[in-house]
Amino acid sequence: MSKAISKDGQAAVGVYVCHCGTNIAGTVDVEKLAKEMAGEAGVVISREYKFMCSDPGQEQIKKDIAEFGLNRVVVAACSPRMHEPTFRRACAQAGLNPFLMLMANIREQCSWVTKDRTEATNKALAIVRATVRRARWMRPLQPGRAKVKPSTLIIGGGIAGIQAALDIAEAGYKVHLVERNQSIGGHMAELDKTFPTLDCSACILTPKMVQVAQHPNIELLTYHEVEEVRGSVGQFKVKVRRKATCVDNAKCTGCGVCITKCPVKKVPSEFDEKMAFRPAIYTMFPQAVPNKPVIDRKHCNYFVRGKCGVCEKFCEPGAIVMNDRDSVRELEVGTIIVATGYDLVDPGQFKQWGYGRFPDVYTGLEFERLCNAMGPTSGKIVKKDGQAPAAVGILHCIGSRDENYCKHCSRVCCMYSLKFAHLLREKTTARVYEFYIDMRAFGKGYEEFYHRVMHEGTRFVRGKAGQVLAPTEADADAPADSMIVVAEETTLGKLLRVPVDMIVLATAMGPAQGAKQVSEMLRIPRSPDGFFAEKHPKLAPVETPTDGVFLAGTCQGPKDIPDTVAQASGSAAAAMRFMARGEVEIDPSVALVRPEMCTACGMCVDVCAYQAIEIDPKRNKAVVNATTCKGCGTCVATCRATAIELQHFTDRQIYHELAGLLGEAW
Amino acid sequence: MIVEYGGQALDECYQCGTCSSVCPWGDFRDFRLRNLIRLAQFGIEGYEGEDLWFCTTCGMCLDRCPRGVKTVDIVRSIRNIMGEAGTLPPLLQSALSGLEGNGNPWAGDPDKRSAWASEVGLRPHTEESEILLYTCCTHAYDPRNLKAQRTLARLLEKAGVKWGSLGNDEKCCGDPAHKGGRKDVFESLRDGNTEQIRATRPKKIVVTSPHCLENFKKNYEGLKGVTVIHVAELLRDLIRDGRLKPEKPVKARVAYHDPCYLGRHNGIYDAPREVLKAIPELELVELSRHHEDSLCCGGGGGRMWSDTPVAERFSVQRINDACAQGAQSLATACPYCVLMLTDSLGTVGKQDSLEVVDLGELLARSIDMGTLEGSPNPPAMVRGEQSSPAPHATGSGR
């Protein structure tokens, strides 16, 4: 071990091979690895240790930097995604630029992918040798700093968006809450009672909605949609479209005369799950926030046929503005929270369970509207013919947990099915049957609720309903217009044919309509089930891989109201982390243009997915915006003049790394 | 042992009972497929109950299983275990033993296998052949299906198709053994057939049975890359290409029965309907269960060689359904279906109100067959043809 000092520019590399318990040492010969690396050019000290990420491990690195004057550090251990920040910090504390530390991944990419000791050790040797060679060519870098605007854009005004908005606003930051419908509230506003407490949904939701409307720090942008997002954490530039409402909210008193006078009476109401009608000028529900109507121009006679204007005639304050048009404005925010929610998957595909084939087959949300006092039947649970049902079947797992539709479990359906059973037994004299595979009552008070419902006389059938049929000769006692639910009672092994006259299908939950466009606009990935992907399912459930963009609520995956609210607060806190510090460190691994070689051909501008590079018209050279650049390297590869270099991944560094892998002298 | 025989899917079943609730036997028997799979999950080495042999492999459970469990493979695996132990149901046992010796399950004389081609002349497969026509044993030996096969031969001649056949060297694809529990018999036939077929270097194989289609496409690894289609697809193509011109009106209300192995197992629903819709003045109606919901005729999975009481027959349900739709003809495109439906038609005495007809036979009625008109079986409207039982079968009808 020579004590090379770095004064003359010689590399002095310290190599640290981690056992990671048996994760690495169980397959890779770590002693051999450390010994061989000691002989590599430039390596001054080479050690192996059980857990490099531990305090003693880090201390050793710091000690060696001081004692041996190390100017490069290579830690051969796990993936940099685990502990790169840990070792960078350790080096920085010892006075070494953190970007002169490299990690060699001999775990996820080596010891975890083979059981063969020889293969693993040989591969580890190649990887670490390559990293040592690259390390000698690394240059110190300084992270950039970007200011973080103390404001948040929240996309979606359901309970998740509302909760996050209130948390952030209360902390003193500004919130722009964008909601594409004309009122906030989301699906929760459609519900009747919520499990397990049976709280009235609107009663617990509306106070928060009003708080949002009145909060000085919240700019409520209903009937708006986000169109474009550029920039990066701390300074997102967002284009938001205000859709024309044709109503001047400042003048409108909310009297509702226009709604009663509108001649177009029969537009299927989205809020009532198309089970009732609304006029062309309408509010969504009585407690809407803001409680001002909008004109649905797709159905309004004035816009479709060129003739009407009745609402305008009857509006005393003169709040109708027929020549209102969409407008776009730009916002600059520091952070973004995505709270776009869920939709139930198209029930039209569930014909084998009766949807669309029989009149009284409902989805969960449709049944909620039947139960709700402001719904199409004023809260009476009746069939389409107006009669109360005699027997109701509640069918679990329709489209969920199913390879033929959605693989995932939609999480809330077992609980709302129990809730429906309870409401049916309370409000009607119907027999109630629940057809289930498992009963998932996982939350606080949920098992107790299940217990309670079991006392009320609902008949539980442990078996998924395979099909719903019209009665045949096999169903001699069933009424001719009933529906036969066919299921195996699996605990008895008996095949049941149960006649019912109403069915509720617990259909699968998917991300809200438009999730794909949001994912592309914000450049956040989606999981295989279609919901937005969190950065790490356990340790970073509200972050996305894009710094500054967070997730809240069911847009990240099916969940109930308690979990949604908890996650929304978590997301708000994560956003405030950036805003409280006021600035954020920018990873210096960004593209850098060497102006003397740039011919301003513009190809780099065309290929950049983040609009982070542009041609400076004054100097006629390409310039990179270091805060927006993600360091993907596409422009580097594209530049024909090789004028662009990726910091921390220069060509020369990579060639030396390759040489190390391939075992050639360079 | 079951895993060895192809039952890996066992791990995934979560016992929801969907299979039991969609199985057509549910109305008639206590057999619960879910229970059989549960026993298999717990490692039974065989199943002595007779219910194991009722499954027709129709595929309703396979289609609907939320976990994608290969239910049919599990049934076959357990049957194979019973087959190894020599405990197959007697009728099935004798049919499958005959399969080994005769190359067909009907105890038919191998030298008479190509009798169907006697009018048009048997064409051996050569390099010039457009297609290798592979005739199902049931089309070769069962009298009712033989008529349909003769009609098919005349259609091919009319269209000028350069077809070729393996003649009397042709052997069963092995389906009864594959589904019925004699893996050894199936593999022997598969290997022999693969060699024989590959030697002819066919451009395209056209099978007359959906069961042969299933086997050649999915269970004959040696035929990967060879194009295999069903005769319904060929007839559709011939009409599209103008080589067959259905011009004579056929005034009939026709219900089409989707065979399990053409429809559910292989996704071919449109080709036969396109053929029927090309026939002028033919009114096509759907049975109440059609496409993926089609009800099995009851003949697959080795059930052809067993007795079913009339009250329990799926084929009777299909006939009743066709009559309920007001159909005069019940058309289909599988020799097993033709056989099962025709047999039951006679047993329930509805042969005066409904006929069971093969797709090709209906098509031929619409085509001016020209010089082929004077053949022994003119394509006139035939009603109530019953199949006579094949020589070896015993018992009071199927």
Image: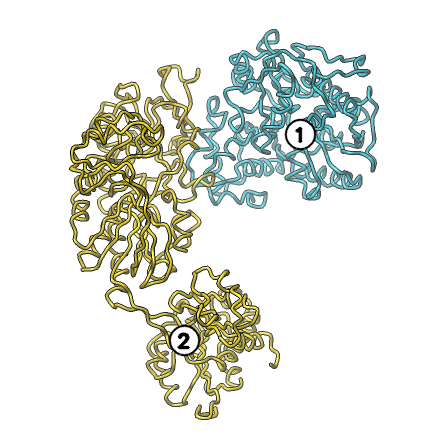
Q: Which residue is mark 1?
A: B233
Q: Position of residue B95 (x, y in %)?
A: 68, 27
Q: Position of residue A580 (x, y in %)?
A: 23, 65
The residue lying toward the viewer, choosing from A260 and B204, is: A260
10 Å crowding of disc 1: few (<14), some (14-19), many (20+): some
Q: Residue at x 46, y 75 (%)?
A: A76
Q: Colour of chain A?
A: yellow
Q: Colour of chain B?
A: cyan
Relative to A539, residue A44 above or below: below
The residues tagged by marks 2 and 1 sit, at their Cα atoms, a distance apart of: 67 Å
Q: Position of residue B154 (x, y in %)?
A: 77, 20
Q: Which residue is mark 2?
A: A50
Q: Position of residue A261 (x, y in %)?
A: 22, 26
Q: Is residue A191 visible?
A: no
Provide the secondary structure element on which disc 2 rests.
loop
C-beta proximity under 8 Å, tags 2 and 1: no
10 Å crowding of disc 2: few (<14), some (14-19), many (20+): some
Q: Are marks 2 and 1 on the same chain?
A: no
Relative to A245, residue A221 above or below: below
Q: Is residue A575 left or right of residue B392?
A: left
Provide the secondary structure element on which disc 1 rests.
helix
Q: Please state which amino acid type lies under the numbered disc 2.
A: Lys
Pointer 2 chain: A
Pointer 1 chain: B
Q: Is residue A179 left or right of residue B185?
A: left
- Could you say which quadrant of the image residue B134 lies in? top right
Q: Please state which amino acid type lies under the numbered disc 1.
A: Glu
Q: How is the image coloured?
A: by chain
Which corner quadrant holds the C terminus of chain A? Answer: bottom right
Q: Is residue B109 left or right of residue B138?
A: right
The residue lying toward the viewer, choosing from A222 and A13, is: A222
Q: Residue at x 28, y 60 (%)?
A: A574
